[in-house]
Image: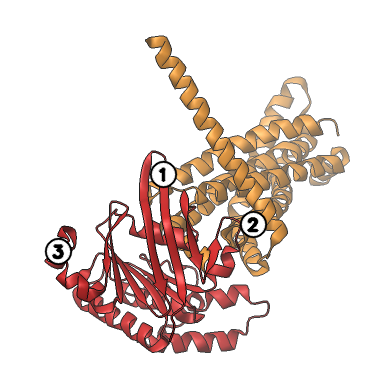
Chain colours: A orange, B red
Amino acid sequence: MKIVFYVELVGKSFLIFLSKVGIFSRFIWKILSQAIKGPFYTKIFLNQLVQIGFLSLPVVGLTAVFTGAALALQIYSGGMRFNAESVVPSIVAIGICRELGPVLCGLIMAGRVASSISAEIGTMKVTEQIDALYTLNANPYNFLVIPRVCACIFSLPLLTLISDILGVFGGFIVGISTLEFNPTNYLLNTVKFLELADVVSGLIKAVFFGLIIGVLGTFHGLNTTVGARGVGISTISAVVWSSISVLAANYILTEALFNK
Amino acid sequence: MIKKTKIEVKGLNKIFGSKQILKNVSFILEQQEHLVIIGSSGAGKSMLVKCILGLENISSGSIFFDGNLISENSDKQKVLNKLGVCFQSNALFDSYNVWENIAFKSLYNDSYPDIFNLKKLAVERLEEVGLPTNIAEQYPSELSGGMQKRVGIARSIFSEPDILIFDEPTTGLDPIMSKKIISLIGKIIKNSKKTAITITHDINLALFLASKIILIDNGKVEWSGTPKQAMLSKNKLLKIFLNG
């Protein structure tokens, strides 16, 4: 009896998993087909660029400055153990540009943007606004999903670039104030070892993170079930799945871009 | 005058998992007729309208608009362009102001929308539904429930559709406001000579507005007829509705 129960449980879970994969695949197909069909709502896209990109600048910027500053201190204390304090500027720059800049930016955006997209669209779903869009000849995929996904794809690399600059700046401030580096030497060492590929690989990651955040935020929003509780559940799911997906994609992309 | 059939529903079934929501629903709605669908909560009234609007796929049966069969492959937008819908929850867009909500269809579908003219038309619709024109720039959240309902009605009539659909237009409103909304709907339909469908559980609304009534119970058409026939009917469920 117990074996039958467990087999049933595994079978049921597998079927639920397959149905979720099916729903998600259909969602992706709808985005692609509607993107080709059009129309593209430029005004809404620009508005979302401000909401998603510009308004995220303060939180992303502050995170980058403090992370760069903390990183400089940690590398200094670690480097001191084998007399390699001088590597602080280059390791901070490479660490921020290749890894911390895009990943932190991705995680912050997963929290700030995926949740807000999901909650907004989810509320529209439970208050019949999505149905109203259909009846008013505005396809929700063109009107809500595509502008948000595009805004995320455009915003993330820009925010990551700003995050890189501010992260290095945070390290620089700590380097010259607390760690007593010569400002000119610090900047020279930063530039000397930092390659264009380091920055570009981070920006490539950011494009994928933007895609993940936009798609998962809108997906969970549009699949919200009835009521306020449904909006809450979809918002949590959007944040959790976006964060996990950003971290998983980061590893896969790091492998792909490794040594490039 | 020979009246054209605007909507024909034949043997409509809707199944969700193991539950059958609509069971063999059939009716004909002719030009300038006002069909009122009544039934208790959960009877399947809203689902029936969602199926007609194409917002839900039907399990079996057929729906005809102006004699044309609507299938999954039909141009649903072409059909939706003929319809003006006022939703139960009003479904006004929070981030757009009142006039943008009313003129939404043209504002976001015309290639080069004439903003000045659209705003003027939206304000005219506001006057038609008895709202002050100075609320045009306000947001839906700043309006009372009754005002939001009127804005929803103004939006549904904005593009002068062939068929108007009102989903539970008096739900959540006080009795005085309900009466005002009922007479407003009656006035709009009478003046515009439009074909209309109204969903409600309010029998007074049905008797006042309808040229034809359908009573739905448990997904089935339990009774159909004119308001006069309804008053004389011996159908038990209809009697419960009539006697409150």
- Of circles 3 and 2, the one toward us is 3
Residue on which disc 2 sits: A146
Pinpoint residue B21: horizontal percent, then vertical percent.
Answer: 36, 49
B61 or A165, which lies in front?
B61
Label for residue B204?
Answer: none
B195 is higher (above) or lower (below) than A86: below
Pinpoint residue B4: horizontal percent, then vertical percent.
Answer: 46, 77
Please name the amino acid that badge 2 sits on. Ile
A6 or B43, which lies in front?
B43
- Callouts 2 and 1 on one subunit: no
Would residue B43 appear left or right of A252 to someone viewing this image?
left
Please name the amino acid that badge 1 sits on. Phe
Instruction: Give the class, few, some or many, for how many residues have Cα within 10 Å of label 2's Cα (few <14, many ≥20).
Output: many
Residue on which disc 1 sits: B16
Would residue A180 appear left or right of A231 to someone viewing this image?
right
Instruction: Give the class, few, some or many, for how many residues have Cα within 10 Å of label 3's Cα (few <14, many ≥20).
Output: few
Residue at horizontal 52 percent and vertical 79 percent from the top: B103
Q: Secondary structure at mark 3?
A: loop
Q: Secondary structure at mark 2?
A: helix
